[in-house]
Image: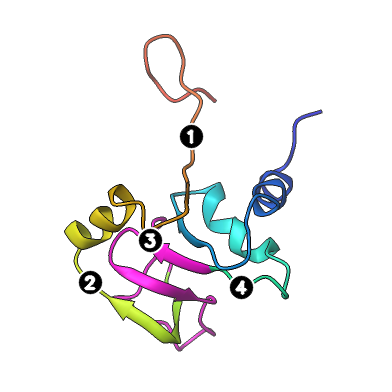
Amino acid sequence: MPLTKEEIAKRIAQELHHGYYVNLGIGIPTLVANFVPQALQVEFQSENGLLGVGPFPMKGAEDADLINASKETVGTLPSSSFFDTATSFGMIRGRHIHLTVLGAMQVDQEGDIAN
């Protein structure tokens, strides 16, 4: 029986360590933050220029300029910082980010998205 998206995200969260800076990609990776144990301090980075991604905002408090890789609105933390995407990818390539969690999709032999 295949794992659900939440089960996959929960398993990925087990790979995180205290003090990690983690980039979360599109799709399932954005769910990982929901399964980080409260005692574990992890900072999330969005490749579009936000370090210190906070929880999803309450309805009505969304800021369309604050989004994650899946284009979902997110919140910030008091320690959040903003920068351009070149700096963001420089952080990843420069090994300042401990872990990048990327999504994937299933495609058929022609490269079309499989159903």
Q: Residue at x 82, y 28 (%)?
A: 1
**Label 1 belongs to which residue?**
104
C-alpha distance separating marks 4 and 1: 26 Å
Q: Nearer the viewer, residue 2 or 79?
A: 79
Amino acid beneath label 3: Lys
Residue 35 visible in the shown view: yes
Q: Main secondary structure of the magenta part?
A: loop
Task: Mark 1 or mark 2: name the one nearer the start of the chain.
Answer: 2
Q: Residue furthest right?
A: 1
Q: Nearer the viewer, residue 81 or 96?
A: 96
C-alpha distance separating marks 2 and 4: 22 Å
Residue 63 visible in the shown view: no
Q: Nearer the viewer, residue 92 or 10?
A: 92
Image x and y of residue 75, in percent:
45, 80
Circle 3: element type? loop
Residue 42 against residue 94 in the figure, above or below: below
Nearer the observer: mark 1 or 3; the answer is: 1
Amino acid beneath label 2: Phe
Circle 1: element type? loop
Q: Residue at x 43, y 9 (%)?
A: 109
**Label 4 belongs to which residue?**
41
Task: Mark 2 or mark 3: name the one nearer the start of the chain.
Answer: 3
Amino acid beneath label 1: Ala
Q: Residue at x 38, y 62 (%)?
A: 46
Task: Mark 2 or mark 4: name the one nearer the start of the chain.
Answer: 4
* Residue 60 magenta-highlighted: yes
C-alpha distance separating marks 1 and 3: 16 Å
**Label 3 belongs to which residue?**
71
- The local crowd at label 1, few if under 14, some if 14 to 19, many if 20 or more residues have their Cα within 10 Å, is few
